Structures are given as structure tokens and as C-alpha cells.
Image (cartoon, rainbow, N blue to C red):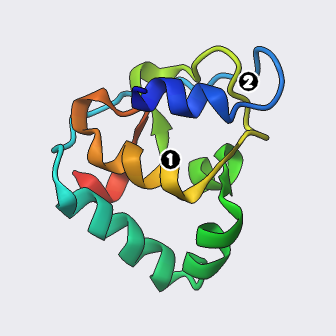
Amino acid sequence: MSTRSRIAAVAVAAVGATVLVAAPAQAADGRCQAAGIATLKSIGAFKAVQANGVSVATAVSLGVTPRGGVLPEGITLDTVIDYKTLVADHRAGANSIFVYPWCG
């Protein structure tokens, strides 16, 4: 199952809000994943996100943007992405749903 399919599978609700921003590339390797974990730890949120996932709204508040500038159909700011899917998206590089500022 692709990262896009996994994220769509955890989507809550129908079509939601959009966020329009530029989306730079990011590498498909463990550095992005490690940087994401470090970011969560630096704000004291690692254990909570690992246990409960993270809403798209919270991720956006940290600077995360949808690749291509628009949230995929079925994903809203209220959608909660589980930790396993979040980690997989960090490893997906240019195929990720989201662009993470710490993955430059």
C-alpha cells in the first residue's frame, strides 16, 4: 500500500480545507525521519504523537505543508495521522504527501 493510500485510509471526513504554499523536494532516506523525531522531542510531543498520532492542523502549525499546496481529497485539518503513517511519509521523499521543513 502506498503512503498516499495509507494517509487516505486514516482520513476522517470528506473534502476539507486547503493550504496553498510552495513545496520543495526532500530526500527519501532516514535523515528526514530522524529530523522529524528530533523535532517532536524538542517540543516535548514525541510520546504523545507516538501514542495518539498528530492532526494535520498541528503539523501545519509546525510548518508542515501539503506537497503541491493542496490537501488530498478526504484529508482535512482535523484528520489525525497515526505515528506509523507519519514516519512512512517522512521516508517517502518526493512521494510524500507532506513537505517537512526540517527535511530541507
Place residue 39 in its image quadrant.
bottom left
Residue type for callout 2? Ala
Q: Nearer the viewer, mark 2 or mark 1?
A: 1
Q: Position of residue 49 (x, y in %)?
A: 62, 68
| Residue designated by label 1 | 85
Q: Position of residue 28 (x, y in %)?
A: 18, 44
Residue type for callout 1? Thr
| Residue designated by label 2 | 17
Please tell me which of labels 2 and 1 falls first in the chain. 2
Q: Is residue 16 above or below residue 39?
A: above
Tell me, yes or no, if residue 63 can be seen here.
no
Say which residue appears at 64% left-offset and 28% top-offset. 9
Secondary element under disc 1, as helix, strand or loop, is helix
Say which residue appears at 73% left-offset and 37% top-offset. 77
Q: Give the label on residue 47, or none.
A: none
Kindly report the distance in space between the C-alpha atoms of the residues bearing marks 2 and 1.
Answer: 21 Å
Secondary element under disc 2, as helix, strand or loop, is loop
Binning the other alpha carbons within 10 Å of mark 2 as few (below 14), some (14 to 19) or many (20 upward) gives few
Say which residue appears at 79% left-offset and 41% top-offset. 78
Binning the other alpha carbons within 10 Å of mark 1 as few (below 14), some (14 to 19) or many (20 upward) gives some
Q: Is residue 11 left or right of residue 38?
A: right
